[in-house]
Amino acid sequence: MATSANFVVKNGLTVGSTAVINSSGAWVGSPTGLVGATGATGPTGATGPTGATGTAGTNGGQGATGATGTQGATGSAGSNGGQGATGATGATGAQGSSGAKALQEPQVVPDQPVVKVPPVLQVLAYLHHPILN
């Protein structure tokens, strides 16, 4: 006996002793076996508050050695050092050669007349001396 009129339940619907629809039309029965199509995704909710700071993690392992850096600038010159200690005495040198023979004054022979020779003649006599030639 189907009709085109709506089925009206005034005080809710009970099947046996179990209420399944209340007087407002809301389902109050067991949800088992009632699966509908998946609904559309709702809008994104508001961002929640920031959480508490977590505990510090453990230290990481030793990293790899870095690349060698560039050569630095040349430093300024240092100050001069102090006076060094006196060195040891050196060895004695070899004997030098004999020097030239000196001019001798004329010998005075007793009972002989003394002749004065001018200096120019003394030099000439020296230059022609057999030791020099």
Image (cartoon, rainbow, N blue to C red):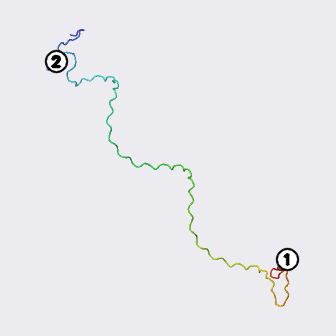
Q: Are discs 2 and 1 less than 8 Å apart at CB?
A: no
**Mark 2, other Cα within 10 Å: few <14 / some 14–19 / many ≥20:** few
| Residue 73, horizontal then vertical, whole percent | 56, 50
Q: Is residue 43 left or right of residue 27?
A: right
The percent position of residue 39, horizontal first and vertical second, equals 31, 22
The image shows residue 25, relative to residue 132, as above or below, that is above
Q: Quadrant of the C terminus?
A: bottom right
The one of 33 and 124 positioned closer to us in this rendering: 124
Rendered position, 58 above or below 113: above
Amino acid bearing label 1: Val
Which element carries disc 1, helix, strand or loop? helix
Q: Is residue 7 above or below residue 74?
A: above
Query: What label sits on residue 82 in the rendered view?
Result: none
What amino acid type should be assigned to the residue bearing mark 2? Thr
Q: Position of residue 57 (x, y in %)?
A: 34, 43
- Which residue is identified by label 1? 120
User: Is 57 in front, or is 36?
Assistant: 57
- How many tags in the picture? 2
**Residue at point 16% right, 18% down?**
14
Q: Which residue is mark 2?
A: 14
Say which of marks 2 and 1 sits in front: 1
Q: Front-most of 116 and 125?
A: 116
Residue 21 or 46: which is nearer the viewer? 46
Counting from the top left corner in percent of width and height, residue 116 is at 85, 82
Q: Earlier in the sequence, mark 2 or mark 1?
A: 2
- Mark pair 2, 1: CA separation: 172 Å
- Left or right position of 4 against 17: right
The quadrant of the rendering that contains the N terminus is: top left
Relative placement, left or right, of 30 versus 128 is left
